[in-house]
């Protein structure tokens, strides 16, 4: 049984929050799982409270109101919700997001496999007008991908580095609290969000770093998707807040891998000749690997998984991942194999690519050196 508490910080978010809560009504969970929702109102002056306190919601919802002060912000609001939660797993969602019916089930499943895990999912940005509660049926029954203006950039990063999020040296940096879950006990153990991080940016990455230092693993579940109601453009104010928070981050954790995050700045500086976020994230990943002494290339044992050999591949990964560098080509895109790859305990390299086409497969095999070209199976 998994009990989930969805924690939503809100500030003058009545319209978006109503749609968010309506989307949470449609969740399809296993019979043994349950969820409740905690909305932390960070001093709103609109109808945010009235939306939450509507008696018609078809799930337990709790409303917490905080007075607006200089310390107000997402970190304080989320910590308030985390402390008040009764669920075993905290699921973090923002008030202007929409979740599909399987969202919570996708978050719950990996936590049953491993109890020291951060689960993150993609956040896609919707295009066009803001959707209301009455638009949800058409969104999820139709071609919702056609409504996406921008897909989560982490998808592109993983396509290069492999879809095993836990193999990244910088997975902690990519823990975005707009769509993440972790057991409450771990959040409390590391002290939750640092409330001195105010404004925009990096309070979630800093929490991710402390969870990483605690030994928590990271998994990216592409089916745990969430939709953001608008695409946010970074402006000069947000960039200044990001710089201030990174300065605090580096002072708090004077480690080279933390300081390496400055290479991300060209992608968040609106006045710069911007490199793409993916280009900057790749530079960060390889810088941290170098700092931590991870050799850029090893020789991998290649496993190609197709119909008839999925069970053998699972057994091989379970038995050998701890002592063998593996490159897994999963022609089935099997969700259980993807989950296993991201949750198996290993300090070796473990790369995973689901359903590459012939061009992509050729690129992968040319990029990652193999033990023997002929050794392609289990």
Image (cartoon, rainbow, N blue to C red):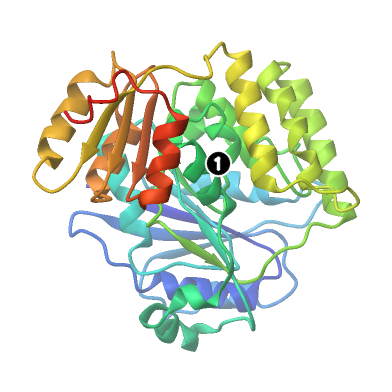
Q: Badge 1 local density, few (<14 within 10 Å), some, or many (20+)?
A: many
The answer, for residue 91, to whether it is visible in the render is yes
Furthest residue to the left? 308
Q: Position of residue 70 (x, y in %)?
A: 83, 48
Furthest residue to the bottom? 134
The part of the image, by quadrant, that contains residue 196 is: top right
Q: Is residue 165 left or right of residue 332?
A: right
Viewer-proximal residue among 172 and 375:
375
Q: Position of residue 27 (x, y in %)?
A: 33, 68
| Quadrant showing the C terminus | top left
Reading the image, the residue beneath label 1 is: 175
Up-down: is 337 above or below 32?
above
State the residue at coordinates (49%, 54%).
122
Viewer-proximal residue among 88 and 181:
181
State the residue at coordinates (51%, 71%).
20
Up-down: is 139 above or below 181?
below
Q: Position of residue 200 (x, y in %)?
A: 76, 49
The answer, for residue 219, to whether it is visible in the render is no
The part of the image, by quadrant, that contains residue 8 is: bottom right
Q: Is residue 194 left or right of residue 307?
A: right
Q: Is residue 361 left or right of residue 187?
A: left
**SS at mark 1?**
loop
Q: Is residue 248 left or right of residue 365?
A: right
State the residue at coordinates (84%, 37%).
244
Q: How many marks?
A: 1
Viewer-proximal residue among 36 and 343:
343
Q: Position of residue 364 (x, y in %)?
A: 42, 37
Up-down: is 36 above or below 211?
below
């Amino acid at each position: 049984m998994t009990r989930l508490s969805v924690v939503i910080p809100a500030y003058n978010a009545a319209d978006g929050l109503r749609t968010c809560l309506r989307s949470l009504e449609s969740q399809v969970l296993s019979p043994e799982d349950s969820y409740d929702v905690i909305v932390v109102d960070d001093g709103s002056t609109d109808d945010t409270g009235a939306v939450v306190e509507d008696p018609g919601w078809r799930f337990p919802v709790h409303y917490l109101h905080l007075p607006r002060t200089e310390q107000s912000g997402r970190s304080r609001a989320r910590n308030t919700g985390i402390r008040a939660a009764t669920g075993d797993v905290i699921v973090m969602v923002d008030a202007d997001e929409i979740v599909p019916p399987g969202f919570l089930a996708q978050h719950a499943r990996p936590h049953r496999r491993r109890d020291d895990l951060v689960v993150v999912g993609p956040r896609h940005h919707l295009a066009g007008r803001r959707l209301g509660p009455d638009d949800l049926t058409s969104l999820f029954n139709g071609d919702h991908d056609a409504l996406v203006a921008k897909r989560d950039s982490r998808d592109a990063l993983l396509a290069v580095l492999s879809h095993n999020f836990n193999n990244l040296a910088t997975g902690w940096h990519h823990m975005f609290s707009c769509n993440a879950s972790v057991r409450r006990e771990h959040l409390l153990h590391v002290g939750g969000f640092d409330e001195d991080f105010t404004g925009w940016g990096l309070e979630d990455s800093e929490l991710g770093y402390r969870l990483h230092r605690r030994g928590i693993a990271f998994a990216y579940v592409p089916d745990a998707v969430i939709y953001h109601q608008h695409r946010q453009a970074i402006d000069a104010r947000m960039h200044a807040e990001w710089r201030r928070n990174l300065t605090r981050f580096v002072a708090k954790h004077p480690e080279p891998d933390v300081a390496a995050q400055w290479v991300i700045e060209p992608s968040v500086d609106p006045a710069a000749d911007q490199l793409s976020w993916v280009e900057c994230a790749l530079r960060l990943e390889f810088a941290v690997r170098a700092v931590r002494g991870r050799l850029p290339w090893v020789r991998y044992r290649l496993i190609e998984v197709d119909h008839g050999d999925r069970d053998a591949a699972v057994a091989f990964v379970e038995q050998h991942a701890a002592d063998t560098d593996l490159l897994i080509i999963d022609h089935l895109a099997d969700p259980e194999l993807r989950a296993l790859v991201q949750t198996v305990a290993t300090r070796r390299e473990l790369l995973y690519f689901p359903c590459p086409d012939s061009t992509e497969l050729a690129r992968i095999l040319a990029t990652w050196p193999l033990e023997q070209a002929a050794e392609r199976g289990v």
